[in-house]
Amino acid sequence: ILKAAKQYPALKLGYHLRALSADFLEIFLDVMKDFDWNTGVHGSSEAFWLWGEDREGVEIIQ
């Protein structure tokens, strides 16, 4: 069970922020896998969606 749990797809996220002006922020994301890769389970790739939202939580930015 532990081996299967370690193969469950998860991501480790890091970020760097830089203010460009009072209204704009530049965001750099570091996205790394945080699970044991098994080609028999995951194949040759694993797809993920990364979503962000505006500060009001109204608009989703992809």
Image: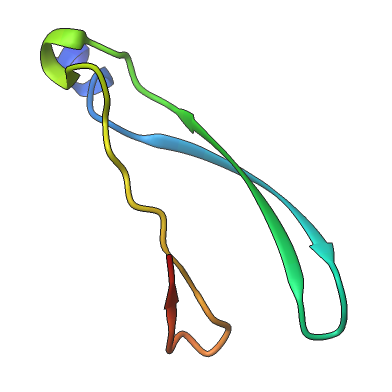
Horizontal and vertical percent position of residue 55: 58, 84
Q: Is residue 27 above or below residue 34?
A: below
Q: Residue at x 20, y 10 (%)?
A: 39
Q: How many discs mark residues in the rendered view? A: 0
Horizontal and vertical percent position of residue 37: 29, 13
Q: Is residue 53 above or below residue 43?
A: below
Q: Is residue 58 above or below residue 44?
A: below
**Residue 22 sits in quarter:** bottom right
Instruction: Answer with left or right where residue 37 lies relative to residue 39.
Output: right
Q: Residue at x 24, y 19 (%)?
A: 7
Dividing the image into 4 quarters, which one contains the C terminus?
A: bottom left
Q: How are the residues colored?
A: rainbow
Q: Residue at x 12, y 16 (%)?
A: 41
Dividing the image into 4 quarters, which one contains the N terminus?
A: top left
Horizontal and vertical percent position of residue 53: 48, 75
**Front one among 22 and 3:** 22
Instruction: Answer with left or right where residue 26 lies relative to residue 51.
Output: right
**Front one among 2 and 14:** 14
Instruction: Answer with left or right where residue 7 lies relative to residue 56.
Output: left
